Amino acid sequence: MRLLRAFLVLAGLASIVGLVAATGPEALLGSVRSLSWRVAVFVVFPYAAVALLHTVGWKLVFHRTRVPLGRLFTARLAGEALNASTASVGGEPVKAYLLRPVVGPVEASAALLVEKTSITVGQVLFFVVGFVVSIARLDLPARFREAMGALLAIQVVAVGGFVLVQLSGVLGLASLVLARFGVRAGTWSAQGLRGVEEALATTYVRRPGRVLASVVVHLAGWITGSLEVYLVLHWLHVDVSLTDALVIDAFGTGIKFLGFAIPGALGVLEGGYMLVFSMVGLGSGLGLSFTLLRRLRMILWTALGVLALTLARPDTRAGAAAAECGVASVGSGARWSELRAP
């Protein structure tokens, strides 16, 4: 376990170094100098509120175990630090690992899948809100609006496909494939996959209200994040409304979606916001300045996540008990076929 924690901490530190190197120390310092003391405010708020809302959204999908909000916040902070360098997925196992004293692996894995779905659905809805508001308030070039509409359609299809995969019972099929290759049904691999499938069924079919509430809270988190755009532009004496800032951030976040496979969306984040700022008449240079400030915030919160990971010390005995409970719960949940039956 010590070697694993050391590896994870090193991976987190690599995330910080990579972000700094890609952004450029001089560019970061230039952005800091432009806002002076306001940078300290920007780093803390509104992202602290955003992180808290996303944590609450995650907490809502746990229906079997009551997980303390503080533990979830710490686990999410540490996991997101690793996501910065691993295409947004490498930190997910870390989140489950840090919940081991409280949550078994089956429930943790299912909750992470549902939370990943709800936060992505929330982001797509944020994109929808921004698109609708842009039609009412902004005179954007027709080709740009059409491109944003096409990108929105792609995201809707992608997220819909992700949901359908979870509802199709593919995890149960995977357990059968494992059995065919000689993995016995009694092993954790096979049992765990079936258990996750049953937990997903229970959450989506029997507790849809929790999933919907999680999506709404995540949407609130995305909307709150647009305050970063408003604050930076306000401090730079640029006349922009809250709704305009929402549109800019919704489109910028939508474009960032294309870089989900790129660690930290390096290049995609900068290019996307430069394009959006240019299309709304604010200039691509201002878009780059804002993105550099957001990079600085990402670097500092990634460092905080690495610190949280360094200090985290899961109780292995409690973790083992939780794991046993998680595996033992397999078969107690409902399968899709049972839930569909009249």
Image (spheres, rainbow, N blue to C red):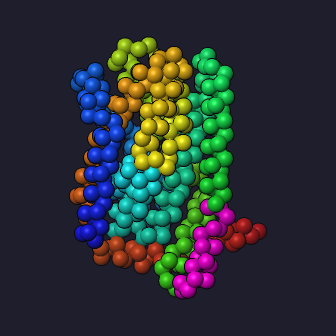
Which residue is drawn at the image coordinates 76% and 68% (left, top)?
A: 342
Of residues 232 and 321, the one drawn nearer to the viewer in this rendering: 232
- Rendered position, 122 above or below 184: above
Image coordinates for residue 214, horizontal then vertical, percent: 52, 49
Main SS of the magenta part reads helix
Instruction: Confirm whether the magenta stretch covers residue 264.
Output: no
Which residue is drawn at the image coordinates 64% and 60% (left, top)?
A: 165
Image coordinates for residue 171, horizontal then vertical, percent: 59, 69
Which residue is drawn at the image coordinates 47% and 37% (left, top)?
A: 268
Of residues 289 and 199, the one drawn nearer to the viewer in this rendering: 289
Q: Residue furthest right?
A: 342
Image coordinates for residue 202, horizontal then vertical, percent: 59, 65
Q: Which residues are magenta?
A: 166-185
- Residue 43 image-quadrant placement: top left
Of residues 188 and 211, the one drawn nearer to the viewer in this rendering: 188
- Rendered position, 130 above or below 137: below
Residue 56 shows in the view: no
- In the picture, the quarter occupied by the N terminus is bottom left
